[in-house]
Image: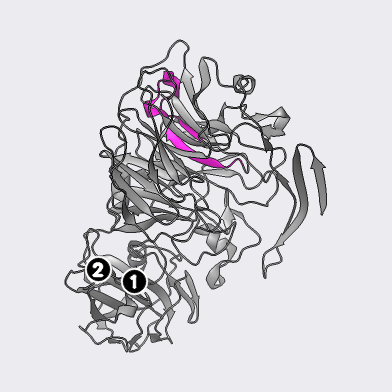
Amino acid sequence: MKRALAAPLMGLAISAAYAQQGDGTQFSTNINIWKPNKVEPTTERIRAIKAPGGFSVTPFATGLKNARIIAVAPNGDVYVSRRDQGDVLLLKDANGDGRADGAPVTVANRAGAHGLAIRDNKLYLITAKELFVADIQSDGRLGELKMLIGDLPDAGQHANRTIAFGPDGMLYISVGSTCNACNESNPENATLLRASPDGKQRSIFASGLRNLIGYAWHPQTGELWGFDHGIDFLGDNQQQEELNKIEMGKQYGWPHVFGNNEVYPQSTPQGEISKEEWKKRSTPMVLGYTAHAAPMQFVFADKSAFPAQYRGDAFATMRGSWNRNPASGYEIVRVRFENGQPKGVEPFVTGFLTDGGKTHIARPVGLAFAKDGALLMADDANGVIYRVAYTGSGASAPSGAAAVPPAGPMEQQANKGNGVPLANKRAETQASGSVTVTSSSFRSGGMMDQKYSEYADGVSPALAWKAVPGAKSYAIIAEDPDSKPVAPFVHWLAWNIPANVTSLPEGVQEQPRLTDPDGVLQGRNTRGSVGYYGPKPPVGEAAHPYHFQVYALDAMLEVPFGSDRDTLLKAMHGHVMGKGEIVGKYGQKQKPQK
């Protein structure tokens, strides 16, 4: 290891090699740790900020310290979270001069306050583990904060949750990974969650996303796009920051695959899954940008007062690297879209990196369009909110309220498999034979113990069945037909259970592939995780029935791990020799104590 010191900053270069356990893969690179020093945003340095012709960059507000995420209310009020101070500030520009009027007003205090969203005259605020909502009063201040969610996963490396309302009216919550690259123990880490606005229902929308801070819906297509953070310690030029099209049920590679399905050599998938198998299940990035630039808030220009050629494009802040020399990021980038598809990423506002890359005056984070159509950017280093305004010829008037993207794409994804019969009533499972199914965990038609529910241990019950002569494999589908709003709710998918196996014990591993019994694959339940997800009916409702359906098949199925019920049923079609079920019931009378 060699160390280089150079005033006014320190760079650390490390020669490293990573090896994948068991396959002999080696990757060697030089690793730089290079963090430019912070300097004051003097008038001269601010003047040196560069933007395209016709654009001006001026301070909207100063002295805000750790300014992070920006949300703008329909009346123009500007809210900014400050994670390190644990609060939310309100700023106004009543006279329209492009500068905040007076000192900011603190309107909320919560430790680790970060993500913000506004809808129906309510401000939503998220911390590492909690989601709050408060009414916005006539003066812009907030009413009482009410907790909607209090059990998001522990944070680890990436504690900065962000939130946004989709065109379908649902709240999307980004939950970063706890680590650089590891197998998470909580399936909600490294995901994008989809929740009802009251917080009572949530599911995993997409996974394999290391740290998706910025995401938004294209105003014309309604498709969801976002910038994910790349893995650290792969060298100056790896891993690129990923622009992804985020779709329900897709897995975006992390932690084992990155970029254009390149293999990360150090990690090992669970269940003896090979990297090639993981690669086949992963969705490659659409576009990449400079490694370690650290993408943050992401917005489309549908509410801008920019020239017409910017409409349909997106902008993202790049907070800046510490794992690269020379430093990358410290800028706002423009993502060019054509016909709803991204075509390239390019610098838009630069100059926050100063003195030839040795210092910086800002680390860009928050990004939002003001009511007048100017772009506001929050700097969490020196606490400045910058205003990027177009003052040249050809400016377009701000469109007022932002265009609402069409809800169709998100609703179609969410409604896939909703309102259909139970699996054993569908054409795909027609069979002449039967399977006798029993359980030592509950009697047929009886109540299930709380430990099998998500209100308690959430372990799978023991199942057993009589062997069917000639069967080559067995499959399990567990469903609740009484759930709302999605019915039936899929609680468990397992297939390629070997023909000589006629039971599964209590507490099956919740991972894509089992090693005992070896080779059993598990799929994506309605919650969005892989493996068994126990009953969790609303408190006070009558007990729901849970149908544990077992199928004898005349073949092993070529169905990838993590597949959904419809994919599994399609593959089962024509191979079902016999079927049977056992039904257990579960209801929750009392709300569990937190």
Question: Looking at the rendering, in which quadrant would you find the C terminus?
Answer: bottom left
For residue 205: magenta? no
Residue 530: percent from the left, percent from the top? Answer: 42, 66
Is residue 313 one of those drawn in magenta?
A: yes
- Could you tell me residue 463's position as x and y percent? 34, 84
User: Relative to 254, is 103 on the left or the right?
Assistant: left
Give the crowd class for mark 1: few <14, some 14-19, many >=20 residues within 10 Å.
some
Please give the residue where the numbered disc 2 appears in the rendered image: 537
Q: CA distance from mark 1 to mark 2?
A: 9 Å
Tell me the quarter of the picture where residue 488 sits.
bottom left
In the depicted structure, whether residue 174 falls above or below residue 419: above
Instruction: Name the residue rendered at 41%, 37% in the picture.
Output: 89
- Residue 336 in view: no
Identify whether 316 is placed above or below 255: above
- Identify the disc placed on residue 304: none
Percent across and percent down for residue 376 are 46, 29
Three-letter code for the amino acid on which mark 2 is drawn? Pro
Please tell me in which quadrant of the rendered image residue 5 appears: top right
Q: Look at the image and tell me whether residue 99 can be seen.
A: yes
Q: Mark 1 sits on what residue?
A: 454
Q: How is the image coloured?
A: one colour
In the rendered view of the protein, which quadrant contains the N terminus?
bottom right
Q: Secondary structure at mark 2?
A: loop
Q: Earlier in the sequence, mark 1 or mark 2?
A: 1
- The magenta-colored residue range is 293-316
Up/down of 348 relative to 15, above or below: above
The front one of 555 and 15 is: 15
Tell me what residue is drawn at x 35 percent, y 36 percent.
Answer: 221
Residue 352 in percent (x, y) is at 61, 29
Q: Nearer the viewer, residue 499 or 198?
A: 198
Amino acid marked by disc 1: Glu
